[in-house]
Image: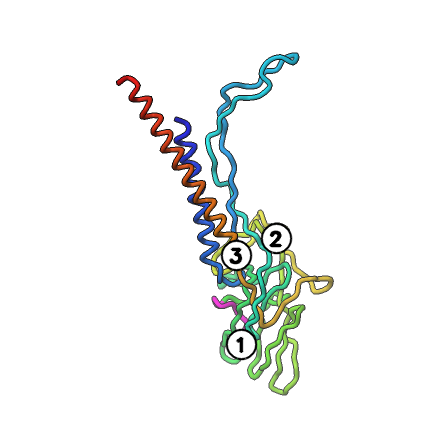
Amino acid sequence: MRALWTAASGMKAQQLNIDIISNNLANVNTTSFKRQRLEFKDLLYATLRKSNLVEGAGTPVNLQVGHGVMASSTTRQFTMGSLEQTNNPLDLAIKGDGFFVIQAPNDEMLYTRDGNFKLSVDGDETRLVTSGGYTVLSDAEDEIIFEEGMVDFAVSEMGVVSATNADGEIEEIATIKLANFINVEGLEARGKNLFSATVASGEEIFMEQEGRTTSIMQSFLETSNVQIVDEMVRMITAQRAYEISSKAIQTSDEMLGMANNLKR
């Protein structure tokens, strides 16, 4: 029976949907996490009878039976999460669009909205890094380095990094680089709150200070944009769809059993 395989495709799709929802809920407290949503599309159709309308007479519609559903894609919603004050001067949040530009140890360019930065000490120099130890880049694509004796780390809304040197003077060190993409949903998630550019996302677009509406908030972190209530509703809906698909399989099996017992 076609219904067996059609209902089975529905159960597989809803199982994957639950996996996506579970990942969203698991990351409800992950800094700057962006929720995912699973999209579906219907499968091929068997045409039992084609429409045939000649001079106003005949059958005006097709007789088609579908073969179920399949998962087509996962879209990541990059809506901004809430800003949480941390009182840590090394915590930065992006208010608006854009990503911090990060350099991995293999010189690969990565992107993140997680501004939970740290200081990495190497001899007399101290550089700004992510919590995973990756280098945070300036608009000149250089490391952001603090010389020995510098204190009172500060970042302006436009991303200008400054600190007080050993002579007590405020010195501008660098400007944090922000980048954006034409299609942010085309970015590839790499884990650790990092993304990489793909052909689908296009190349990075440098966000210049002039005319930019995006700003950087010091001592703030962006929270996850996962809404627990919405995810719970989606989970209940997916569960009910899974149950009804399993019921369709059970009904199809009972119908086959009736057909097999007709000779008895």
Q: Amino acid at mark 3?
A: Val
Q: Which mark is residue 226?
A: 3
Residue 109 visible here? no
Mark 2–mark 1 contact, CB under 8 Å?
no
How far from the left and from the top, in percent, is residue 65? 49, 26
Residue 68 picture location, percent across and down: 46, 33
Label 3 Cα neighbours within 10 Å, binned few <14 / some 14-19 / many ≥20: many
The structure residue drawn at horizontal position 55% and vertical position 82%, both measured from the top left corner, is 148
Which residue position is annotated with label 2?
Answer: 203
The CA distance from mark 2 to mark 1 is 30 Å
Start-end of magenta stretch: 125-133
Kindly state the secondary structure of the residue where label 2 is placed: loop
In the picture as drawn, the residue positioned furthest to the right comes out as 211
Say how the picture is coloured: rainbow
Q: Nearer the viewer, residue 118 or 32?
A: 32
Point out residue 246 in the picture as x, y percentages from the top left corner.
Answer: 39, 37
